[in-house]
Amino acid sequence: QLRLVESGGGLVQPGGSLRLSCAASGATLDYYKIGWFRQAPGKEREEVSCINSSGGSTGYADSVKGRFTISRDNRKNTVYLQMNSLKPEDTAVYYCAARLQLFGDSRCVGMDYWGKGTLVTVSL
């Protein structure tokens, strides 16, 4: 069974940077699309970014476009989220999630496997 573990969260000042990691075990990520999601207290969970199985296609929420970059290293079975120019509104628990990518559909919907999340706090 695929397991996902996020790491890299913490406290950072506005304008700062963090890199989140999503390490997979139990299966190879070669055929999985991966999404990063976040949820702030009292707020709806939202998709932050998505990457297809090969890494050749990526997508971003408008709120993070130009500031965040998703990438993957299938050899290391790990997906990353580089977060730059962080804002207080980026504060949330960040989750990675995976789903087998079938028939070329790279959209991050119906994700089957989820990590437990890592907290990112952007504050002075």
Image (cartoon, rainbow, N blue to C red):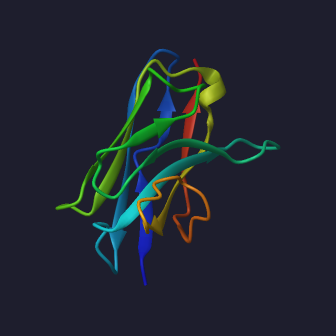
Relative to the observer, which residue lies in front, 114 or 14? 114
Question: How far across and down, in percent of the image, does residue 83 sit?
Answer: 42, 30
Relative to 111, is 43 on the left or the right?
A: right
Tally of numbered tags: 0
Instruction: In the displayed orientation, state which residue is furthest to the left.
Output: 75
Relative to 31, is 67 on the left or the right?
A: right
Instruction: In the displayed orientation, state which residue is furthest to the front.
Output: 103
Question: How far across and down, in percent of the image, does residue 18 sit?
Answer: 40, 33
Could you tell me which quadrant the N terminus lies in? Answer: bottom left
**Picture quarter containing residue 5?**
bottom left
Residue appearing at x 40%, y 41% in the figure: 58
Residue appearing at x 57%, y 20% in the figure: 87
Could you tell me which quadrant the C terminus lies in? Answer: top right
**Image: 44 above or below 96:** above
**Image: 98 above or below 55:** below
Residue appearing at x 60%, y 58% in the figure: 109
Question: How far across and down, in percent of the image, does residue 33 sit?
Answer: 42, 59
Instruction: In the displayed orientation, state which residue is furthest to the right.
Output: 42
**Picture quarter containing residue 82?**
top left
Question: How far across and down, in percent of the image, does residue 38 sit?
Answer: 61, 45
Residue appearing at x 44%, y 56% in the figure: 34
